[in-house]
Image: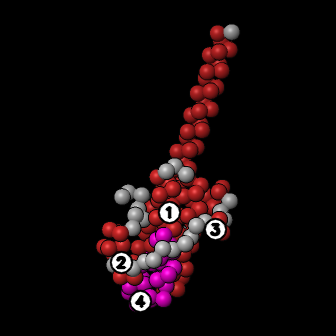
Amino acid sequence: MKNQLKTLTYILIILFSSHFSLLSQEQSAVSELLNRNEVAIYKAQKEMIAHNAKTNIDKLALSVTLQVKAIDTYKKGSLNEASNYAIASRENALLILKDLLDVKQLAYFELDNSEKNIVKTINYNPSTLNNKVEAYNEAILLDPIKIRETYNISINQ
């Protein structure tokens, strides 16, 4: 009986460890997704400024809004919801970048294999998201300093 209890204890420890290890890996993957989104958003903003492409301002506002929601839900521990918002945010940033960059420059901002796995895992469905964009200030969105001060689009803030 004592040996069986000991064995059961070891099995439970192994199960809990593997569960927390998988959770940690998922959290790390979502964190990396959010970090890469931040880079994509700033690149989209930079290219809009360089090309004087204000026609994409609505896409930038939506990308920022979705990233803010992704950060908020990530910090609350809802990794699936954060991932959904983050993927939608990246898609909008990519729409801007596709208009302004050549194919070689665009490759870095496309979803990598890890991010594509997240899409499969969470059953990504953008139609379920609250992607309503509140009123925004174009001057803030197109200012590299003010956008950082106004919107929390980094998990490091």
Residue 140, numbered circle: 2
Is 2 part of what is drawn in magenta? no
Q: Which amino acid does label 4 sit on?
A: His
Quarter of the N terminus within the rendering: top right
Please tell me which of labels 2 and 1 falls first in the chain: 1
Please tell me which of labels 1 and 3 falls first in the chain: 1
Q: How many labels does the image show?
A: 4
Residue 126, numbered circle: 3
How far apart, in angstroms, are the residues tagged by discs 1 and 3? 13 Å
Give the foreground label among 4 and 1: 1
How far apart, in angstroms, are the residues tagged by discs 2 and 1? 18 Å
Residue hosting label 1: 69
**Left or right: residue 78 compared with residue 155:** right
Please tell me which of labels 4 and 1 falls first in the chain: 4
At mark 2, the secondary structure is helix
Quarter of the C terminus within the rendering: bottom left
Please tell me which of labels 2 and 3 falls first in the chain: 3
Q: Residue furthest left?
A: 145
Find residue 50 and report its image quarter. Answer: bottom left
Answer whether labels 2 and 1 touch (C-beta < 8 Å).
no
How far apart, in angstroms, are the residues tagged by discs 4 and 3? 29 Å
Query: What residue appears at the point 61 percent right and 58 percent down from the top-left corner?
Result: 118
Q: Which amino acid does label 1 sit on?
A: Lys
Question: What stretch of residues is rendered in magenta?
Answer: 43-65
Residue hosting label 4: 51
Q: Closer to the camera, 140 or 49?
A: 140
Please tell me which of labels 4 and 2 falls first in the chain: 4
At mark 1, the secondary structure is helix
